[in-house]
Amino acid sequence: MYPFVRLAWQFFIHRKTGSLAIGQTHYSTHYCLPWDLDLWRELNNGRTLSIYDMGRLPMARRSGLLAILKRKGWGLTIAGSSVRYRKRIRVFDKIEMRSRALCADARFMYLEQSMWVKGTCAGHALYRTAVTNADGIVPIENLRAELNPNTPLPPIPEWVAAWITAEDLRPWPPMQDTH
């Protein structure tokens, strides 16, 4: 089941945290709980993505994005992700999460998140996200007009541009087995 109570807790503890601009980092703390484990007694990869939500959504609130989505009737979606797992996270480990909006192109925002345990990076995620309405994806310029049109977008880092290129080369729909 999705950890709604834990997400609500994150919104509660960050309710008075100041606003956040693109490129600034949202820091949050989480714990690996017994029900987050897989068969090898480490943080389950699916639960990892849910815990990343608990950093990303309060970050979106702090940036003013959630208020805009509510006012305009827009939605927010994940259009792609790439996750690296580098260190096991065990039960009751304290996780410091760092979340930030990195950059954007004409259609998508790119977000970066990482999990740190005892000062070591345990995992890192890159997300391609989009704001949506009844017609599909809301252009970034429309979103910027709502957020802060005077704030310039940071350039797309080389490693993110390479990932975007790789995603563009990836076949869609995927090959189907002919058996």
Image (cartoon, rainbow, N blue to C red):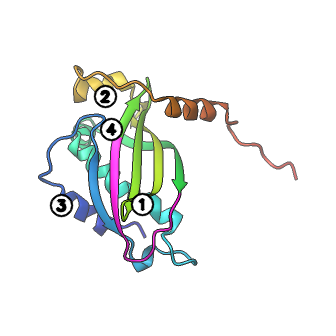
Residue 38, compared with residue 108, is above or below; it is: below
SS class, disc 1: helix
The residue at which mark 2 appears reads as 143
Q: Please indicate whether residue 106 sits to the left or right of residue 26 in the image.
A: right
The foreground one among 4 and 121 is 121
**Distance (Cα) linking label 4 and label 2:** 10 Å
Residue 169 shown left or right of residue 142 in the figure: right
* Residue 90 within the magenta-colored segment of the rendering: yes
Instruction: Look at discs 4 and 2 and give the one toward the viewer.
Output: 2
- Tell me if residue 101 is in the magenta stretch: no
Residue drawn at the location 37% of the way across and 55% of the way down: 53
Q: Is residue 152 above or below residue 58?
A: above
Label 4: how many Cα within 10 Å (few below 14, some 14–19, many 20+):
some
Task: Specify which label sits upstream in the sequence, 1 or 4.
Answer: 1
Which residue in the protein does label 1 denote? 50
Task: Indicate which disc, 4 or 2, sits on the residue closer to the N terminus.
Answer: 4
Identify the element where label 4 is drawn: loop
**Circle 3 sits in a helix, a strand or a loop, which is it?**
helix
Q: Residue furthest right?
A: 179
**Which quarter of the figure has residue 10?**
bottom left
The disc label shown at residue 74, or none: 4
* Quadrant location of the N terminus in the rendered image: bottom left
Segment colored magenta: 86-100
**Mark-to-mark CA distance, 3 and 4:** 25 Å
Image position, residue 146 (x, y; %): 24, 27
The numbered dot on residue 13 is 3
Badge 1 or badge 2: first in the primary sequence: 1
Question: Pointer 3: residues within 10 angstroms few (<14), some, or many (20+)?
Answer: few
